[in-house]
Image (tube, rainbow, N blue to C red):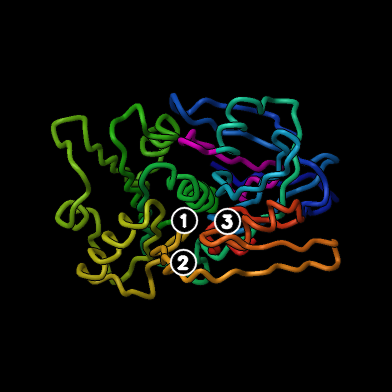
Amino acid sequence: MTAHCAGPGLPLWQGESPLRCTGRREETSDSATFVFEAEPAAHFDYRPGQFILVNVTIDGKKQCRAYSLCSSPSRPEQLAITVKRVPGGQVSNWLLDHLQPGHSLQASAPAGEFFLQTDPLPTEVILLSSGCGITPMLSMSLWLLDRGYPGAIRFIHSARNLENVIFREELLSLASRYENFHLDLVLSREGPSAGRLNASRLAEQVPLPGSSHAYLCGPQEYMTEVADWLIQLGVPAGQIFKEDFAPAALQSCATTGASFHLDVPDFGKSTQIQEGETLLEALEREGLPIIGACRTGVCGS
């Protein structure tokens, strides 16, 4: 595989113009990958593992959500995200039901503090994911392989069964073509070794813990558990990187009977914040222009 180059003289896309969907690929029964190009033509530059904020209008209301890029900046002519259907997932489900090649949408420039550390590259890269946390891991893998990375890439992904593995065919193809791409699909409900990832199975996949960088993406409990196992194996805590798109814990406030007043004079808005309501929800209720992508205060939008 060779690195792709953008056309000569193409400007850098920074979210100022729409993205046009040029391809859609069904990954599983409840997920799909969407490929985008800039209009007018531009090239993309970002770090493997970063995300974009996608903006859509649903029932007359603007919505914004963060999606990790599964494409690689070594192929700068396109961006790609993978979306999974989730209960109550307003934007994700809308994209799966409506977005098709030829459609356009607005998005922000790639951002995020979770990305492949490339200066310097370690002897081995361990990529650990569960569910749709697989998306940034594919981006990192493609970048490493496109750049001819000589070290081991240990791609360990957890899913219920093979049918639920996003990028299944692409991952199997990479494993068959590249000797340094080591794929371990941990299937909890299928096959002779069915079961969840555990410390002993992880130990079999990490022969050089002190020389490895490990990247984790998935449910918070999964990442916490796996990070503890890695540290026990000898991977330094400073060489473990996690994608945190959820708060570690939600704090509930005691009922006080207090009322909170919100004034936004520049927009002529004044309202009461109801007990148990977040500031974001109050701002949205009043129709004020506020971007809330992850809705938990951790994505930085």
> x and y percent of residue 160 in the render?
28, 35
Picture coordinates of residue 188 (x, y %)? Answer: 22, 38
Residue pictured at 60% horizontal, 25% vertical: 97
Q: Secondary structure under badge 2?
A: loop
Q: Which numbered tag is attached to residue 149?
A: 1
Please state the extent of the stretch shown in magenta in the rendering.
72-89
Crowding at dot 1, Cα within 10 Å, few <14 / some 14-19 / many 20+, comes out as: some
Q: Is residue 3 above or below residue 32?
A: below
The mark total stands at: 3
Q: Position of residue 272 (x, y in %)?
A: 67, 63
- Position of 78 compared to 299: left or right? right
Q: Indicate the position of residue 171 as horizontal and vertical percent values.
A: 41, 37
Q: Mark 2 or 1, which is nearer the eye?
A: 2
Q: Quadrant of residue 236?
A: bottom left
Instruction: Indicate yes or no whether the magenta region holds residue 186.
Output: no
Mark number, residue 50: 3
Measure the C-alpha gap from mark 2 to mark 3.
Answer: 18 Å
Going from N to C along the chain, the mark reached first, 2 or 3, is 3
Q: Tell me which numbered mark, 2 or 1, is placed earlier along the sequence.
A: 2
